[in-house]
Each structure stands twice: as C-alpha cells, then as structure tokens.
Image (tube, grey):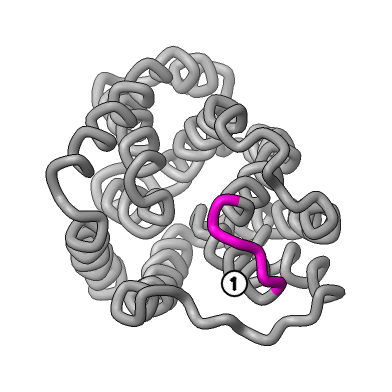
Amino acid sequence: MNISLFDLAAIAIGAFGVGFFKSTFSMAVGLVLVPVMVIFWPTRFIIGIIAIHMFISDYAVIRLFWKQWDWRLAKLVIPGVCIGIVAGTATLVNLPDYWIRKFIGIGCLIFISIQGWSEIKGGLPTPRIGRRAGFAIGVIGGIISAMTHTGGTVFTLYLLSQGVKKVNLVATIIVIWIFVNPLKVSSYYVGGLVGNKILIAGMASIPLAFLGGWIGRGLLDRVSQRFFNTAILFLALAAAARLLWE
C-alpha cells in the first residue's frame, strides 16, 4: 500500500489526537477522533491507524498506574475481550463500509448518552452486573472496541458495578488493553486493515502523541474538565449525526 501525503496527515492527526484525548478525556478517542476522521479518510484506514497509536500509548502510561489495577477482575474480562476482538475484526473486514459508518454513528450516540448522564449527574450510575459476567462483558467490549474503539465504556460500567474506585478503574482498563492490544493490532494486520508501511509510519509519529498529551494537559489547566467534556460531547454528537445522515 502506498501512503500519500494526505494519508500521512491522517497518521499525524491520529497520533496527536490520541495523545491529546488520553490526557484530557480518553473516551473521546472513540467518540470524537474516529467519527470525525472517518468523514475525511477511508473508514478502515482510520480505525487501523488509531489502533496502532492506542496500542503504543497504553504502554507509555502504564507506569503511572503500576500495580493499582484489580487483577482479579481483569483476568475475568481478558479472555472474553480476546474472543470479541477476533469476532469484531472479522466483522469489520467483511462488513460494507456504509454499515461500518452507521455502526460507528449509532455506537457514538449510545456512548454519548452514557457519558452525558455522567456529566449531568456527576458520575455514571452503578449498574447491577454479577462478577461472573466478566467474560461476557469482555466479549461485548472486545467486539465494540474492534469496530469503533469505544469498548472502554463497557468495561467502565462493569468495573463500577464491582465497586472499583477511579484510579484503580483506570489502571484496570489500561492493564486489560496492555494484554489484548497486541492481539487487536495483529488481527488488524491479518485482516489487511494495517500493513508494514502504516505500522512504521504510525510508530514514527509517536512524538506527536506526546506533544498532543502535553498540549492537552496544558489546556485542562485553563478550562474546567466539565466544560471540556461537554464541548467534546457536542462535537461527538455532530460527528455521529453526520455519519448517520450521509
């Protein structure tokens, strides 16, 4: 696959965007970055490059949450996530582009509603989910993650139901990705969503991810987290509406 300057711009924007949102509002990677970028670039191409950036960024931040995860819950979820990622990737590869974009739009609306509730009420509601449901939750989250990069919201609801607190919740989600992201990128590679040139270009753009993270953190020092999150949700809503309307 030949990479044009326009494609290189997407890779650079993706790297910067992942770093920016990882340091401000991580859910926005799937809620805003993916839907906005697929308006301008091929859907599978954007999903592939974002996977590479997220794969590397999690390894960069894991040291900040070292041993703060709940391994008992993570190991219940990880096997299901692996199955879900393979199933989701197979669906992604074979599904017509039109329906992938509709799926992204619908998924965004669902997760915008969940996050909007969190912003209004000051937190997500604590659902009643049994601890043993971890495997099924993993499968669902893995499928959604493979297709839209928004599986983290599913894991958040499950961990909240188990009484996991904020820092431990973030750490547990990160450690889940640490174990399953290699499979995700590998599945994308086998499915033809990413190739050698895209892998190399994606890794070479990582400095832009650090720049995005630095700028994002600086922005939050100047505006409130709630104002920023609300603005992001409106942008996500506009992007979702655009994908569903086309």
Describe residue 42's horizontal placement relative to residue 79 as left or right: left
Q: Image quarter for residue 90? A: bottom right
Q: Residue at x 45, y 71 (%)?
A: 107
- Location of mark 1 (residue): 157
Vertical arrangement, residue 176 with respect to residue 138, above or below = above
Is residue 246 among the parts visible in the rendering? no
Is residue 73 among the parts visible in the rendering? yes
Q: Residue furthest left?
A: 222
138 or 186, nearer to the observer:
138
Count the numbered circles shown.
Answer: 1
Amino acid at the residue labelled 1: Leu
Vertical arrangement, residue 231 with respect to residue 12, above or below = below
Q: Residue at x 38, y 20 (%)?
A: 3
x and y percentages locating residue 108 in the rendered image: 39, 68
Q: Residue at x 42, y 77 (%)?
A: 114
Main secondary structure along the magenta-highlighted residues: loop
Vertical arrangement, residue 232 with respect to residue 121, above or below = above
Vertical arrangement, residue 179 with respect to residue 159, above or below = above
| Magenta span includes 90 | no
x and y percentages locating residue 10 in the rendered image: 30, 32
217 or 205, nearer to the observer:
217
Q: Residue at x 42, y 19 (%)?
A: 206
Specify start and end residues of the magenta stretch as a single range: 162-167
The 10 Å Cα crowd at callout 1, few under 14, some 14 to 19, many 20 or more, is: some
* SS at badge 1: helix
Describe residue 86's horizontal placement relative to residue 5 as left or right: right
165 or 60, nearer to the observer:
165
x and y percentages locating residue 78 in the rendered image: 79, 53
Indicate the quadrant containing the C terminus: top left, top right, bottom left or bottom right. bottom left
x and y percentages locating residue 204 in the rendered image: 44, 13
8 or 130, nearer to the observer:
130
Q: Image quarter for residue 127? A: bottom right
